[in-house]
Image (cartoon, rainbow, N blue to C red):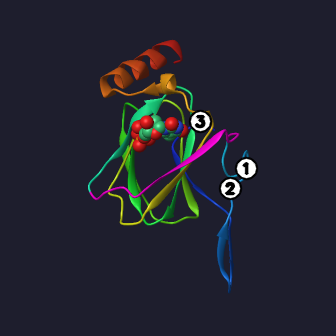
Amino acid sequence: MKDEVRIIQLPKFLDRRGNLSVIEEMQAVPFSIARTYWIYDVPGGERRGGHAYRNNRELIVALSGSFDVTVDDGTAKRRFRLSRSYYGLYIPAGVWREMDDFSTNSVALILASDNYDRADYIENYKQFKAYVREQARTRP
Ligand code: TYD
């Protein structure tokens, strides 16, 4: 399957004590997990993200509350509202992503395939468009 942005449904175990969901590497999440971080206490109206990665792949889960993730592969933009902790949004490398419209007390959990490396970031949208063109030219 082409490596593309998609919603992944995570296992969910329900019983009278409440719910439990789980993520195991190479199963629900299609990569080995090198790192996990979370974004929380985001003030109303703030945006996060606003970059792409050359190699890093991610799965984003709304552990609590809700927020929007806008993804852009250089050709088309899609907006996802994440609001359930049993869905993850998979983002392959080379996709511009931004997060906004965080509800009060929301928590975004992000699983990443690679360790933190600022050199892997494409921080500027113009550079991102040039990167996408270059990728299309060298890897048609
Ligand atoms: P940043 O990448 O700007 O956050 P966002 O994904 O919302 O754009 O990261 C914010 C700060 O946290 C920045 O100083 C770098 C630091 N940081 C780490 O040290 N390790 C990490 O794994 C991440 C994601 C960020």
* Residue 95 as seen in the image, left or right of residue 56: left
**Height in image: 84 above or below 51?**
below
Q: Where residue 2 is drawn, which disc sits there?
A: 3
CA–CA distance in space, label 2 to label 1: 8 Å
Q: Which residue is mark 1?
A: 27
**Height in image: 27 above or below 140?**
below
Relative depth, front residue between 76 and 118: 118
Q: Position of residue 96 (x, y in %)?
A: 41, 35
Which callout, 3 or 2, points at the residue further toward the start of the chain?
Answer: 3
Give the quarter of the figure containing the N terminus. Answer: top right
Q: Position of residue 122 (x, y in %)?
A: 42, 26
**Quadrant of the rendered structure where residue 56 is?**
top right
Please indicate, yes or no, whether residue 72 appears anywhere in the rendered image: no
Q: Which type of secondary structure does the marked residue at label 3 adopt?
A: loop
Check residue 26 for magenta coloring. no
Q: Where residue 23 is drawn, which disc sits there?
A: 2
Relative depth, front residue between 77 and 105: 105
The residue shown at (68%, 40%) is 31
Q: What amino acid is found at the position of numbered circle 1 in the picture? A: Gln
**Height in image: 26 above or below 140?**
below
Which callout, 3 or 1, points at the residue further toward the start of the chain?
Answer: 3
The residue shown at (63%, 37%) is 113
Q: CB under 8 Å between callouts 2 and 1?
A: yes
